[in-house]
Image (cartoon, rainbow, N blue to C red):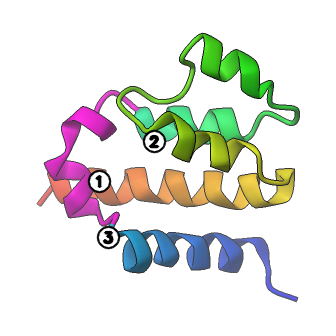
Amino acid sequence: MRIGAELISEERMKQIVKHGFTGEHHFNHPEWYENGQLIRASQILLTKTIDSERIKKYHLFPKNWDAEWFQNLCDRPYKERMIISGALIAAELDRLNHIDK
């Protein structure tokens, strides 16, 4: 059985390898990632019971993110959303590390 940190690390690597969501990518796309959008997404995913219709209706998903893509994340089981949430926090750290270079 893998520990939580391993699960989060694996998810973060998937974000990087499969989707190209590196710290540099996040830095180069402020329209998607500035102003805490990764943290906002992380917080939404940590909500135990997500009201998907409310998220759509009030555009509660992160600014400029694809609504369907984010909805897919919201529809996943809570444990999986927790792992993704942790990886999004790691992604924000990667973005900040790129800024500090």
Q: Position of residue 38 (x, y in %)?
A: 45, 42
For marks 1 and 2, give the CA distance: 10 Å
Q: Residue 60 location in percent, x, y?
A: 57, 20
Which corner quadrant of the image does residue 70 belong to? top right
Residue lying furthest top: 58
Q: CA distance from mark 1 to mark 3?
A: 13 Å
The kind of residue tagged 3 is Gly
Find out whether the residues at labels 1 and 2 contact each other: C-beta distance under 8 Å: yes
Residue neighbourhood size for the residue with mark 1, other residues' Cα within 10 Å, grouped as few (<14), some (14–19), many (≥20): many
Inter-mark Cα distance, 3 to 2: 15 Å
x and y percent of residue 32 in the render? 30, 38
Instruction: Give the foreground label among 3 and 2.
Output: 3
Q: Which residues are magenta?
A: 21-36
Residue 59, disc: none
Which residue carries the number 1 mark? 95
Instruction: Residue at 78%, 33% (x, y): give it.
Output: 47
Badge 1 or badge 2: first in the primary sequence: 2
Q: Which residue is mark 3?
A: 20
Q: Residue furthest bottom?
A: 1
Q: Is residue 86 above or below residue 34?
A: below
Secondary element type, mark 2:
helix
Quadrant position of the N terminus in the picture? bottom right
